[in-house]
Image: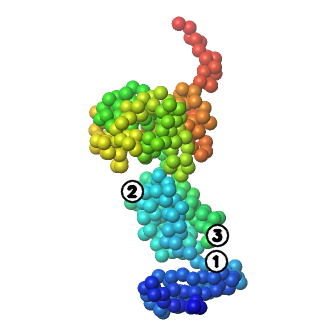
Amino acid sequence: MAQEIGVFKRPDSRFYWINTTLPNGQRLRQSTGTESRKEAEAYLAKVNLDAYRQAHFGVKSERSWEEAVVRYLELKASLRSFRDVQRICRGLHPYLAGLNLNQITGDEIWRIAQGELKRGNKPATVNRYLALVRNLLHMARDEWQWVDTIPKIRMLSGEVERDRWLTKEEAVRLIAACPSHLAALVRFALATGLRASEITGLEWGRVDLARHTAWLNQTKNGTSRGVPLNVDAVAVLVEQVGKHPQFCFTYNGKPIGWDVTNTAWHNALRKAGIEDFRFHDLRHTWASWHRQAGTSCDELKDLGGWKSRVMVDRYAKFATEHLQVAASRIESMFGK
């Protein structure tokens, strides 16, 4: 039976469908997502017009912010930080909803920045919003070829780089103040530098205690990597053997599927006398201790799973062994 051309109804769908050949020769057959024939015909006319303008005048079809977000989220769905990406997209919706990508100008970016600052957000938080918009627009231009130009987006100044880490004595106090399941997470974080989600999601099938190695199948940047386990990390894992058939870290026999910075975490901080400290700061502590012990930035980059030296260079200031000779040049100048 010959296929229907134009707008038609399928017996298995309540929506109208279109079947057409675009000016560039591409065959298009898809649902219009509407039950109104007039709307379906208008959609078909728009598709053909956009294709004609693109084929003959090089004019790209207009794409909406919503379309871009849908594709962006599909591409980011495998990231551990996917919920944060979703949250930021929802926060951007009031500013960019209903706009086409070519309508997002410097003025719109300014509105986002000023609107979030007025809500009381710090520059660091606002920069997360701006960074997502910038990343999405770069993909729309360079990879999807949906737009030809995008606004230049600069991050806000005044973002204070977080520099919070524990001394060995503070770490001992914190571990002692934690309930056993939380103490295990803290000890493992300090031994490996892994993020909270990477630890709670670690499965026995990805651990080789004999070879002192673990494998992460999903990290923050979306890549898999191996993690060498030192003696302290292995000791923590050995203590967990037999508690659960799949997951390494559990609470009352069940996998830890909630935010580890809960009441138990805050109670432990208070009991240990530690203020302004997040679980992720254990990763900063691990990196700082490594640099203080002489681990090079390149080694630390590979150990921590960072893709570039930018993050690792933050910890360079903690290594001073290469300056010992210079410091000793003026020692004992005043006698005893």
**Disc 2 target residue:** 120
- Pointer 1: what residue? 60
Real-space CA distance between mark 2 and mark 3, rounded to the nearest whole angstrom: 36 Å
Residue 94 located left or right of residue 243? right
Sequence-first tag of 1 and 2: 1
- Amino acid on which the number 1 mark rests in the picture: Lys
Q: Secondary structure at mark 3?
A: loop
Image location (x, y in percent) of residue 313: 58, 39
Mark 2 against mark 3, which lies toward the viewer? 3
Residues at circles 3 and 1 in contact by the CB criterion of under 8 Å: yes
Q: Is residue 141 shown above or below 281?
A: below
Image-based side of 89 in relation to 327, left or right? left
Label 1 crowd bin: few (<14), some (14–19), many (20+), radius 10 Å: some
Q: Which residue is mark 3?
A: 145
Q: Residue 163, image x and y in percent? A: 47, 39
290 lies left or right of 280: right
Under tag 2, what secondary structure? loop
Residue neighbourhood size for the residue with mark 3, other residues' Cα within 10 Å, grouped as few (<14), some (14–19), many (≥20): few
Query: Looking at the image, can residue 317 be seen?
Result: yes
Residue 23 vs 147, above or below: the answer is: below
> Whole-percent x and y of residue 180?
31, 34
Residue type, mark 3 in image: Gln
